[in-house]
Image (cartoon, helix red, strand yellow):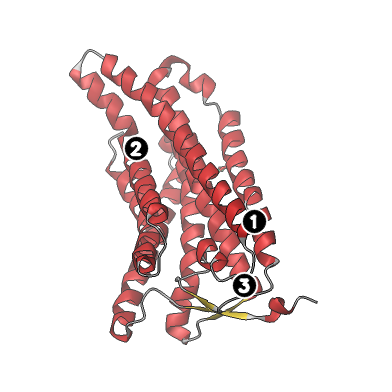
């Protein structure tokens, strides 16, 4: 019997300073409620409004579901523990949270990639748009995103669940973040560190390239349009997606490229809060600003 199955972890939270607890709670709660409200609105509109039954909104609906689930999976503990005062979580609970969040966050990047391809077809191949982005393609693309993200991180969670020795039980984060959790392991963690590092780099680089390559074609195609109004119109159709993608990748890169020394952990948490709570909150706002 594995003794670690019964162990508990302490989630350190966003800040240690007692005076900050209430303002942080209110801020996080507001961000969380805005995310839920905005994404629910998108979801209802996408389902009810026949005008929004296009591939772009099909993906956006799925992105909203992922956004809501990923913020719920990452923020539930910190919100509940503020109210109840209990900041302990079981090992299994911690692994579940880690798995759900990592998969859903990975899934968001995949859906954004699919949307990028959708924009590419819309701008570079407009006459065949209906044909290429038919219902079957959309279902196939989104289903693969969901399956892929949930399968991809199984090996990591399995290897995390194998850890039997911990230097400390205090997770210095506001949820069981995969990196924060892995830092607690003692002994030889070379294999775990390397496999996690390689697969996150792979996932991020892969989705980054697949997301931005269509934009090389999109931009060169927009530059070839002669009329100013045509240029602007084409740009409008992808500006909101591009904004979200740039925001998300910039903050992801900042979060993971800043070396994780002890004092940068606080900065790291702030970027992480931005990624987990602010970006999903901004998505609906950016999309609703878009002109159709
Ligand atoms: C999300 O994708 C699935 C297919 O994978 C589809 O059936 C569903 O309608 C989509 N959801 C929304 C809200 O667009």
Q: Which mark is residue 231?
A: none
Q: Left or right: 142 with respect to 28?
A: right
The x, y position of residue 193, in whole percent, is 58, 57
The x, y position of residue 219, in whole percent, is 32, 24
Q: Which residue is mark 1?
A: 191
Q: Which comes sooner in the sequence, label 1 or label 3?
A: 3
Of 275 and 111, the residue lying toward us: 275
Q: Left or right: 20 with respect to 91?
A: left
Q: Quadrant of residue 184?
A: bottom right
Q: Which residue is mark 3?
A: 93
Q: Left or right: 236 with respect to 58?
A: left
Q: Quadrant of residue 245?
A: top left
- Other-residue count near label 3 (Cα within 10 Å), few / some / many at <14 / 14–19 / ≥20: some
Asked if marks 2 and 1 touch (Cβ < 8 Å), the reply is: no
Of 179 and 126, the residue lying toward us: 179
Residue 96, compared with residue 20, is above or below; it is: above
Q: Which comes sooner in the sequence, label 3 or label 2?
A: 3
Q: Which residue is mark 2?
A: 242
């Amino acid at each position: 019997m594995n003794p670690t199955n019964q162990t508990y972890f302490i989630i350190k939270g966003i800040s240690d300073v007692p005076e900050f607890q209430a303002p942080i709670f209110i801020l996080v709660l507001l961000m969380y409620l805005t995310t839920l409200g905005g994404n629910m609105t998108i979801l209802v509109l996408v389902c009810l409004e026949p005008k929004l039954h296009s591939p772009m909104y099909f993906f956006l609906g799925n992105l909203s579901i992922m956004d809501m689930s990923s913020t719920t999976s990452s923020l539930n503990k910190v919100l509940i523990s503020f109210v109840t005062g209990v900041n302990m979580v079981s090992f299994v609970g911690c692994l579940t949270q880690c798995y759900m969040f990592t998969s859903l966050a990975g899934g968001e990047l995949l859906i954004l990639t699919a949307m990028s391809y959708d924009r590419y077809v819309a701008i570079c191949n407009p006459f065949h748009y209906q044909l290429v982005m038919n219902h079957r393609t959309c279902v196939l693309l989104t289903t693969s995103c969901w399956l892929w993200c949930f399968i991809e991180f199984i090996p990591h969670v399995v290897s995390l669940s194998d850890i039997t020795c911990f230097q400390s039980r205090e997770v210095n984060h506001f949820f069981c973040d995969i990196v924060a959790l892995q830092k607690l392991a003692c002994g030889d963690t070379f294999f775990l560190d390397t496999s996690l590092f390689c697969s996150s780099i792979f996932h991020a680089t892969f989705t980054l390239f697949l997301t931005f390559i269509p934009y090389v074609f999109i931009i060169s195609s927009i530059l070839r349009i002669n009329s100013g109004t045509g240029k602007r119109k084409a740009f409008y159709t992808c500006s909101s997606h591009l904004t979200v993608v740039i925001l998300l990748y910039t903050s992801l890169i900042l979060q993971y490229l800043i070396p994780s020394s002890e004092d940068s952990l606080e900065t790291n948490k702030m970027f992480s809060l931005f990624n987990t709570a602010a970006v999903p909150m901004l998505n609906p706002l950016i999309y609703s600003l878009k002109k159709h």
